[in-house]
Amino acid sequence: MNIMITGSHGLMGNRLVADSRQAGHTVYRLVRQSARKEPQQIAWDPTTGQVAGSWPDDVDAVVHFAGASIAAGRWTNARMAVIRDSRVVGTRLLSEAIAGWQHKPEVLICASAIGYYGDRGAEELTETSDPGSGFLADVCQQWEAATQAAEDAGVRVVHLRFGMVLSPDGGALQKMLLPFKLGLGGVVGNGRQYWSSVFLDDALAAVNHVRDTPELRGPVNVVGPQPVTNREFTKILGRVLRRPTVIPMPRIIGRLVLGKMVDDLMIASARVLPHKLAGTGFGFQFEDLESGLRAILGSK
């Protein structure tokens, strides 16, 4: 296939490019104007939708991962605007461009997040659950709605609602490893909030599964089959690393250090289940948190 990928230099995008090329696909990287030139690279400005040159006319699938990091600094009002606009504006402009292509892709796979569901306690959440409230929930709703032009043009659109993607090479787990290895890891808040996560290899396999499964459209939860609470997550990671986990992070300290993001990213509870993936025969490489952490962290 011919696949176009945005956000292709991030944790997931970079791996998806390499894996797709290894599988024999042709990959176009859609990158910002300032990026260095590479083969099959298309430069565009996601704030205006302008592309350098012309769009390719043979794209079968578009995977859209681009968006400003949600954990790259305190959530000031200005930073929250960047987080929102980098997703909503870029997605809308890309979708409008796709709608105008003479040869349209079979599928547009757009990243979203389980932040869509907001803070829901122990409620089991599936793709049919109502949206929640809060900053991330609002962003995710606008983000998903921004693909409307492509859907109206007859393109199959899938919104991948990712949980916390676990990898020692980036993301939240990488940030946790040093304090946990130093024995400074502990529960956040009361620890009862659910953290729904997915290992990087399973997340990438889910992207390919969605691409190759025509009946999948709309929201798809990309999370492992066994969500755990923050307290359980903390105990398991400490056990895998053979370190104590007795130093908690009170909510008030989290807010002082991280600002508004602590409520949406660390305190909010989302017990999310991958019903659509399970219902279309997707098999997880890592069925539970502990076996997955031992595999990726090299612990027996």
Image (cartoon, rainbow, N blue to C red):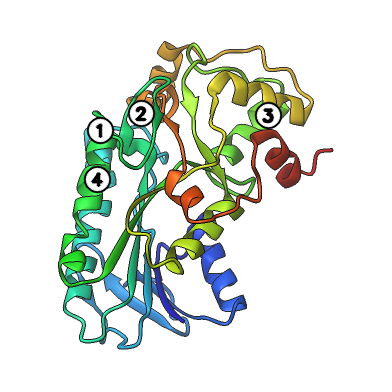
Distance of mark 4 from mark 2, alpha carbons? 14 Å
| Mark 2 or 1, nearer chain start | 1
The reply to whether callout 4 and callout 2 are in contact (CB within 8 Å) is no
**As displayed, is residue 102 above or below residue 262?**
below
| Mark 2 or 3, nearer chain start | 3
Left or right of 181 on screen, residue 283: left
Query: Can you say which quadrant of the picture contains the C terminus?
Result: top right
Residue denoted by label 1? 135
Residue denoted by label 2? 264
Residue drawn at x 24%, y 28% is 133
Instruction: Characterize the local packing of mark 3: few (<14), some (14-19) or many (20 or more) Cα atoms within 10 angstroms.
Output: many
Residue drawn at x 42%, y 39% is 71
Distance of mark 2 from mark 3, alpha carbons? 22 Å
| Mark 4 or 3, nearer chain start | 4
The reply to whether callout 2 and callout 1 are in contact (CB within 8 Å) is yes
Q: Secondary structure at mark 2?
A: helix
Distance of mark 3 from mark 1, alpha carbons? 29 Å
**Residue 48 visible in the displayed image:** no
Residue denoted by label 3? 237
Distance of mark 2 from mark 1, alpha carbons? 8 Å
Distance of mark 4 from mark 3, alpha carbons? 31 Å
Q: Residue furthest right?
A: 300
- The dot on residue 84 is 4
Question: What amino acid is at disc 1?
Answer: Phe
Residue drawn at x 43%, y 20% is 122
Residue drawn at x 23%, y 74% is 98
Q: Nearest the camera: 108 or 168? A: 108
**As displayed, is residue 287 above or below residue 182?**
below
Instruction: Characterize the local packing of mark 1: few (<14), some (14-19) or many (20 or more) Cα atoms within 10 angstroms.
Output: some
Q: In terms of image quadrants, where is residue 235?
A: top right
